[in-house]
């Protein structure tokens, strides 16, 4: 863990708005959002069918009478089905990563882009960013929202941007050494790749200039945070966003690092049971659903994210009033059902990182060669622990098996592989290969 101290800095007053004022603002903006969304063909048709108008929304409780929107709706209707402004008002297009199928495209007006920069500035400042800092961004630039969203948020704060983009890790290390950035932005898994390459080139990762990091783009565990902070000697912050809703900037951690503050003056969040669509209790895990209160070009109402998290409404010592969301523990569409047991890849990661001698690089393969599911977890061993002694490797394999079983409740095949064997991802790490769909 780094010894750097984070000041509790607030970007703007809206972050500390009293809850009663915040709810009044949300209600006003929800009505405006419904009015604006009625310009989009998809919502116009549904609102007409269900008799929904902005003036019928009397309280925030009326949100539950509005329709849920899904990624499949976005795919079927296309961009034109959700545009609420003329094409000439569009300033930029982005798209989802396409990790679960065909990318979904989103549009931004100039006003949307300004808001996006402000929302990213909020969580960056909360996580230690100062105008005098330099920020190394190793997110990819392009349709993916991560690179551009953080880039403009950094510039809004007044800090310098090093737009390294993704890939070519030796060059990333060279740039960090040459320009001495204090802040790293990217995916958590790729930061470990940077540390690994730096060490292979004879550099001590902890001696790099990095002091803070802001990670997003993929789920990661608290154990992964501890490993990254130990490897790179920095303080790592979590943030959350998704292309369809805005991109990064939906929520982010403060200096307390006990959940990510949702920017509730611009988003209404719900947490529902993905099977019943009913709300879950505070602190209970469910699927996050977002309504965009301020987006102009492409407002979304009750958008189902598929992300599993929980909400905490308790006051935060930092003074921000926005509800905090926990880490995303998985997605409803990446949950594995193994012999009737629900398993998320993050649970396996948690188990692996408890075992000394394991590198944080793994691959989960699922198959059904007969009548039962079989799971093989390929795990890299750290160089100093790798051995040609069968007894030593078997003992390590058994420790991993016990940890996986203690968390998931099922047994999996564990295959230990040599260091540097598994493919390194330049963006979102691919953790699961499921062969069952091909059988």
Image: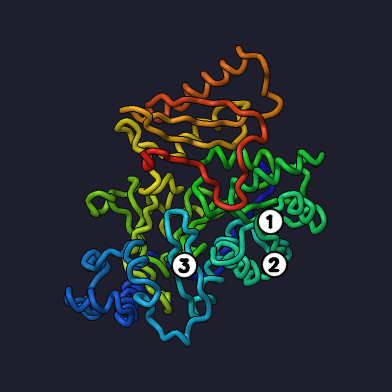
The residue shown at (28%, 48%) is 281
Residue beneath label 1, please? Answer: 183
Q: Is residue 20 visible?
A: no
Disc 3/disc 2 C-alpha distance (Å): 22 Å
Disc 3/disc 1 C-alpha distance (Å): 23 Å
Q: Is residue 317 visible?
A: yes
Quarter of the view holding residue 121: bottom right
Above or below residue 397? Residue 1 is below
Q: Quadrant of the N terminus?
A: top right
The residue shown at (46%, 27%) is 404
Residue beneath label 3, please? Answer: 246
N-terminal of the pair, mark 3 or mark 1, is 1
Q: Quadrant of the C terminus?
A: top left
The percent coordinates of residue 71 (x first, y second) are 36, 62
In this picture, residue 71 sits left or right of residue 416: left
Residue beneath label 2, please? Answer: 159
In this picture, residue 61 sits left or right of residue 185: left
Disc 1/disc 2 C-alpha distance (Å): 10 Å
In this picture, residue 181 sits left or right of residue 120: right
Secondary element at image label 3: loop
Contact (Cβ within 8 Å) of mark 3 with mark 2: no
The residue shown at (29%, 75%) is 42
Depth check, mark 3 against mark 2: the one in front is 3
């Amino acid at each position: 863990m780094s010894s750097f101290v984070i000041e509790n800095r607030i970007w703007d007053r809206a972050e500390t708005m009293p809850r009663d004022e915040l709810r009044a603002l949300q209600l006003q903006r929800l009505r405006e959002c419904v009015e604006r969304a009625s310009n989009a063909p998809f919502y116009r048709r549904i609102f007409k069918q269900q008799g929904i108008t902005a003036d019928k929304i009397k309280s925030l409780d009326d949100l539950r009478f509005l329709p849920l929107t899904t990624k499949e709706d976005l795919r079927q209707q296309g961009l034109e089905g959700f545009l609420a402004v003329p094409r000439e008002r569009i300033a930029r297009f982005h798209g989802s990563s396409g990790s679960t199928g065909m990318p979904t495209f989103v549009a931004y007006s100039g006003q949307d882009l300004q808001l996006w920069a402000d929302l990213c500035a909020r969580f960056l400042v909360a996580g230690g960013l100062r105008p005098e800092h330099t920020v190394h961004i190793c997110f990819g630039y392009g349709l993916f929202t991560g690179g551009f969203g953080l880039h403009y948020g950094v510039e809004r704060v007044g800090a310098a941007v090093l737009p390294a983009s993704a890939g070519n890790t030796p060059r990333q290390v060279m740039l960090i050494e040459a320009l001495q950035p204090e802040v790293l932005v990217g995916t958590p898994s790729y930061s470990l790749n940077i540390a690994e390459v730096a060490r292979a080139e004879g550099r001590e990762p902890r001696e790099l200039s990095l002091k803070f990091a802001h990670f997003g783009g993929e789920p990661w565990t608290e154990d992964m945070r501890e490993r990254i902070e130990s490897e790179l000697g920095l303080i790592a912050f979590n943030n959350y966003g998704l292309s369809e809703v805005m991109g990064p900037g939906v929520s982010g951690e403060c200096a307390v690092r006990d959940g990510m503050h949702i920017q509730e003056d611009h988003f209404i969040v719900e947490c529902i049971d993905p099977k019943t669509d009913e709300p879950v209790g505070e602190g209970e895990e469910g699927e996050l659903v977002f309504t965009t209160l301020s987006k102009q070009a492409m407002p979304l109402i009750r958008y189902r994210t598929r992300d599993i998290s929980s909400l905490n409404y308790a006051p935060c010592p930092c003074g921000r009033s926005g509800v905090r969301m926990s880490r995303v523990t998985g997605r409803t569409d990446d949950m594995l059902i193994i012999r009737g047991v629900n398993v998320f890849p993050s649970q396996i990661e948690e188990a692996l990182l408890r075992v000394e001698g394991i590198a944080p690089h793994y691959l989960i393969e699922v198959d059904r060669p007969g009548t039962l599911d079989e799971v093989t977890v390929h795990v890299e061993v750290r160089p100093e622990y790798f051995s040609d002694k069968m007894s030593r490797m078997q003992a390590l394999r058994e420790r991993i098996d016990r940890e996986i079983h203690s968390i998931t409740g099922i047994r999996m095949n564990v295959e230990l592989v040599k260091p540097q064997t598994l493919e390194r991802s330049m963006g979102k790490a691919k953790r699961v290969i499921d062969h069952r769909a091909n059988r």
